Amino acid sequence: MNPFHQMRLALAGLMLAALTLAGCAGPGSYVVLLPSPDGTVGKVTISGASGQQVLTQARTGSMLNGKEAPFEVSREQLAKDFGEAMSARPALPEHFLLYFMPGGAQLTPLSVTLLPKILQRAKARHAVDVSVIGHTDTQGKAETNEELALKRAAAIAEQLRQMGLKDTVISVESHGERNLLVPTPDETAEPRNRRVEITLR
Amino acid sequence: MTLWRVRIAASLLLMALAPLSQAQTEAIGYVKTVTGDAWVITAGQRVKAQPGSAVLLGSQLKTSHSATMGVTYKDDTVMSFGPDTELTVDEYLYAPAQGQLKLTARLSRGSLNYVSGVIARLKPEAVSVKTPTGIIGVRGTQFVARVEDDQ
């Protein structure tokens, strides 16, 4: 083999190695749009030093510097670059609504039956923290309702603690009559607005 | 002299208590999953992350080589990180009843899986993830992002 030939071979080998490396390394710094856990696909915008891009299709990606049009990302590439981050994803938060009898912090009979299920779900979660937000309907004064909603949330938090969530962080909040589930005029009794929202995170 | 001592003691006590009364000592989220060595660094204080560790405004979340971590925020935003990752929460406002919503995070290296929460649903333009080369905006969805060191 003459020296010229050898050099060409070596060069070809080098190029092949470079190509293989590029294939392994993935696109570099980039972002990929994925479907939401509920199956819908939203949108991601990228404002980079070299341009702007918008992603609207699941499993399309863009360089973070905004250069070049969006590209498709294979499941293999996703698993390789993001598998560990994805597998560390905590369980998604769960939401529950409990409803109250008018004027006080007494649950409706149907809502009472939900409490054990909520407790069971809370205990099944890893390092759970709980949020309880109280609401009222628009009957009565806004300030009174602010207090009533807090009383409702505090009563439910206390019940959850007594039922077994002793060492759990439970945050208690009041939205009074400011955050209606069903919009109504003032001074309207509405059972669906007399509620607490429980979130298990 | 005695009065002086009392005064000094009182002011020291006030200084010690002051940070507690500020909003940034309130948890904005909690660590839920950890594998390997990961940290939550807040105002220079480095805490080894474990399930239940609090994340505060300004916290830097860090995973070491071959470690992972997952965090759930007060508004149900969920973020998880692969190995060798650094993310800082620069702004976090969640008072939906007052219409105050904001989430700004900085991914300086590594990999992130983001699932949007209430802030992105109520006010999409209030959420952004900054990276060394560009800013990611979110319209109610899930995404993954990767920042490589050499860029």
Image (tube, coloured by chain):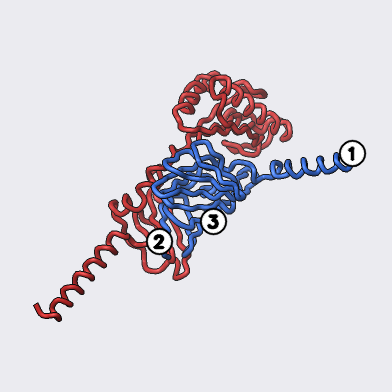
Chain colours: A red, B blue
Q: Chain of mark 1?
A: B
The outermost residue toward the left is: A1
Circle 3 sits in a helix, a strand or a loop, which is it? helix
- Quarter of the image for residue A125 reads top left
A61 displayed left or right of B125: left
- Residue designated by label 1: B2
- Residue B142 in sight in this render: no
Q: Nearer the viewer, residue A55 or B108?
A: B108
Residue in front for this viewpoint, A194 or A22: A22
Secondary structure of the residue carrying tag 1 is helix
The residue tagged 3 is B125
CA–CA distance between discs 3 and 1? 57 Å
Foreground: disc 2 or disc 3: 2
Same subunit, labels 3 and 1: the answer reads: yes
The amino acid type found where label 1 is placed reads Thr
- Residue A168 — which label? none
**Dot 3 falls on which chain?**
B
Q: Which residue is rendered at x = 50% and y = 52% of the image?
A: B87
- Mark nearest the camera among 3 and 1 is 1
Q: Amino acid at mark 3?
A: Glu
Q: What separation in Å lies between label 2 and label 1 (alpha carbons)?
A: 63 Å
Could you tell me how far apart the alpha carbons at marks 2 and 3 are, in whole angstroms?
23 Å
The residue that disc 2 covers is: A29
Q: Nearer the viewer, residue A183 or A24?
A: A24
